[in-house]
Amino acid sequence: QEQAKILSEYFGLNTSSEAKEVTIKPIGNGHINTTLLLQGTKSPVVVQKLNTYVFPELNELVNNARLIERHLENKKNSNNYKLDIIKHVATTEQKYLVDINGDNWRALEFIGGSYSEDVVINKQQAKIAANAFGQFAAALEDFDAKKLFPVIPDFHHLAKRIEALKSAVNLDKHDRLSSAQDQVDFCLGQEGLVEELELLKTKLPLRACHNDTKINNMLFCSKKHNAKAVIDLDTCMSGYWLFDFGDMVRTFCSPEEEDSTNLDNVVIREDIFEAIVEGYVTPLKNLITHVEKQSFWVGAKVMCLMIGVRFLTDYLDGDNYFCIKRAGHNLDRAKNQFALYQDLLKKEGKLKALLD
Ligand code: ADP
Ligand code: MG
Ligand code: MG
């Protein structure tokens, strides 16, 4: 409550005489920042305590998002972008970051009449979400990707992620290697994918990418269930569309959550894969190059493998990056991602045909 009061003063949500009416409550299911809804007498705002372990460069992070905000706003004014835009709210002193006892907070306009999902329910939903990410990508087509600061350098660099795994294996700081040897061997057997990706990159245009195209990073309209907004612009950086496509495949296609140990059910739902292709490619159809579309298959493989590699590395390292709720949680997540990756390989023929 004390924090709510301080935040509402910074963001001018109340006059001090009304300060009692301020309420604060958690919303959503984000894994990186702490996200709360702050309500006072003026319009509610979303406040986020930003994770400085993941994002040491907060000014650059906010600056990236605000550059994109303004670009999308121009598009929207000329009728070239239809979704809502998630905008930063300034403090009464025109600042976008506030420090409260060493914690860093920002505020975003609350998008009311919306909800987010954590697991894709059906192919209609997958198509709507993929289409929203496609509209977002299309709107950024003429945005200079080089303007975006690399808030997490080499975020989707498979080769470096595998190198990090190798060092964690060599150090084996927490004596966990013996419990993960099979998974480590499996990963190191997949290094051929690194070359495939590096070769592709030389042929692809650099794009401004979202880089975190999970289902809970978009909002659906509560009434019509259509797409309302693409949110969570924290990891917007220059990159390749194949990663955004691949992360949708990774996070939409499995009927299980990414930490499920029910590995028999960790599979690629082909109808969802097809819905992602249709939904995402339609807004991009006049922009996407042939090689780019072909690259999406590699994107799907890379994202499933790479996130698995990261979970495995974090497990060996002692769980520093991803929050864990139980012992072995990161190892479970890694096993889950490798099961998904293997199912993807098994269905290569059919899935590639859907991309063609
Ligand atoms: P994280 O970076 O931790 O993933 P997000 O920015 O994705 O945090 O926010 C977490 C969740 O909070 C979202 O999945 C969504 O449910 C909710 N949320 C975030 N911003 C808004 C907003 N502006 N309006 C409504 N809901 C929001
Ligand atoms: Mg998020
Ligand atoms: Mg985020």
Image: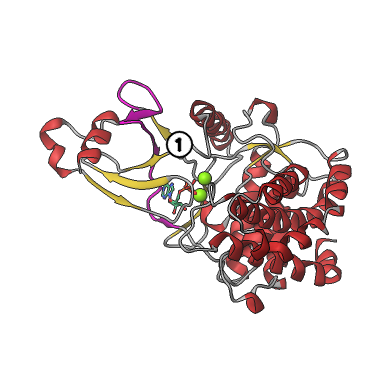
- Element on which disc 1 rests: loop
Pointer 1 local density, CA inside 10 Å: few below 14, some 14–19, many at least 20 = some
- How many numbered tags mark residues here? 1
Asked if the magenta segment contains residue 57, the reply would be: no
Q: Residue at x 66, y 60 (%)?
A: 250
What colouring does the structure picture have?
A: secondary structure
Q: Is residue 150 left or right of residue 12?
A: right
Asked if the magenta segment contains residue 93, the reply would be: yes
The kind of residue on which mark 1 rests is Lys
Q: Nearer the viewer, residue 205 or 50?
A: 50
Residue 185 visible in the displayed image: yes
Q: Extreme front residue here?
A: 175
Residue 337 visible in the displayed image: no
Q: Is residue 177 above or below residue 340?
A: above
Query: Where residue 153 sits in the image (x, y, percent)?
Result: 66, 34
Q: Is residue 279 above or below residue 81?
A: below
Query: Where residue 271 sits in the image (x, y, percent)?
Result: 70, 72
Q: Is residue 337 above or below residue 26?
A: below
Q: Is residue 281 left or right of residue 41?
A: right
Query: Where residue 356 sits in the image (x, y, percent)?
Result: 85, 61
Q: Extreme bottom residue here?
A: 264
**Image quadrant containing the N terminus:** top left
Magenta span covers which residues? 91-115
Q: Quadrant of residue 119?
A: bottom right
Query: Where residue 351 sits in the image (x, y, percent)?
Result: 80, 67
Q: Residue at x 77, y 49 (%)?
A: 285
What residue sits right under mark 1 in the picture? 87
Q: Is residue 195 left or right of residue 153?
A: right
Q: Nearer the viewer, residue 146 or 127?
A: 146
Q: Extreme left residue here?
A: 17
Q: Is mark 1 within 8 Å of ligand 1?
A: no
